[in-house]
Image: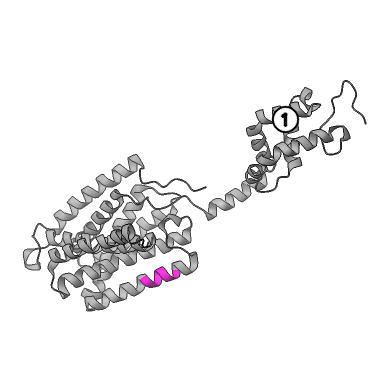
Amino acid sequence: MAATADEPALVGPHRPASRQADRASDLALAPALPEAREAAGDRVRVDQVRHEVAEEVPEAAEAQPWGFLKNWYANLIDVNQNVAMASSAEAMTSGERAATRRMLSKVPEVTALFWITKVLTTGMGEVTSDWLVHRLGPPPAVAIGFVVFVISLAAQMVTRRYIASVYWLAVVMVSVFGTMAADVLHVGLGIPYAVSTAFWAIVLTAVFLLWQRTEGTLSIHSIHTTRRELFYWAAVLSTFALGTAAGDLTAMTLHLGFLGSGLLFAGLICLPAIGYRFLGLSAIGTFWAAYVLTRPLGATFADWVGLPSWRGGLGIGTGTVSLVLTAAIVMCVGYLQITHEDVEPESI
């Protein structure tokens, strides 16, 4: 039916009078089509977008192709919103599926304060583990450490994004329980430090190999799924146990003492930074090397300050050192919790 004087011509693929308007709108809408498709889950065609626009423009402009284009530019944002709403049920379903597969980053940005807090947790975990074992005895101390470790890690796993207080509580408990796990092999089973160090090195290597083979990357900036987060925490626990065994190996078996071992690892931890900065070594590899070395660095200095003189320490007391390091950790984490300066930008 032909349009009358009182009935303006309609825009649509079956209206011969509007073919010129259709062609002009197709050309104008083409640049916005990828964005519109993304908004609606890649289910949009040009003619769908055109119909959405046709509902928004004034009737006087519908009969004039170039007036149509002018109104289209003015309503570009509304068009994209209408296109997304046209298939909202299906788009929302796919969005929900994507949300279950992909989380916001669950780990912090690597900053100077990250490394400071990390070293503090290693020392705190070392002396706290020693204090608990000597106060409560090995079985109760290990049982309590394990329970709190599981609770803190579960709290971290159920969060949908990085929260400083939750994340660092998990790191602290990994430090405490990782120390206990390493000490059990030597103190409880009588395994030499050299053997326990080699054992935890093999465990960490196996975690890295399986992680790399399964996920294709060891980058901490890719922790966006539950499976990757599980690999991450398995690696973290292994690094703490390995670092504990290595620190005891150098301090006791190699007779460097706690101060000598601390100075040794203070020098060794500079090597990954030098390799990354000046030799072009892998950022991922140097990060994990430094991460492993923070454990014996913090632990040996904490032992040197806290343990009695007959064990090579200054004799201040493991309980006192634990409280001081805990207070320092609380201040660092509180600052991060308030400022959010270590929160990674959301990945799109």
Residue topped by disc 1: 69
Closer-to-camera residue (238/116):
116
Instruction: Tell how many labels.
Output: 1
Check the image and report above or below for 129 versus 245. above
Q: Residue at x 13, y 73 (%)?
A: 255
- Give x and y (percent) for residue 345: 44, 45
- Residue placed at 17% from the left, 50% from the top? 324
Seen from this angle, which residue lies furthest right? 1
The image position of residue 166, as x and y in percent, is 36, 50
Secondary structure at badge 1 equals: helix
Three-letter code, disc 1 = Leu
Q: Is residue 296 left or right of residue 169?
A: left
Outermost residue, front side: 278
179 drawn magenta: no
Q: Residue at x 78, y 29 (%)?
A: 65
Can I make out residue 148 in this image?
Answer: no
Q: Is residue 206 magenta?
A: yes
Give the camera-side residue of 12 and 122: 12
Neighbor class of circle 1 (other Cα within 10 Å; few <14, some 14-19, many 20+) is many
Magenta residue span: 205-210
Coloration mode: one colour
**In this orientation, does residue 300 appear?**
yes
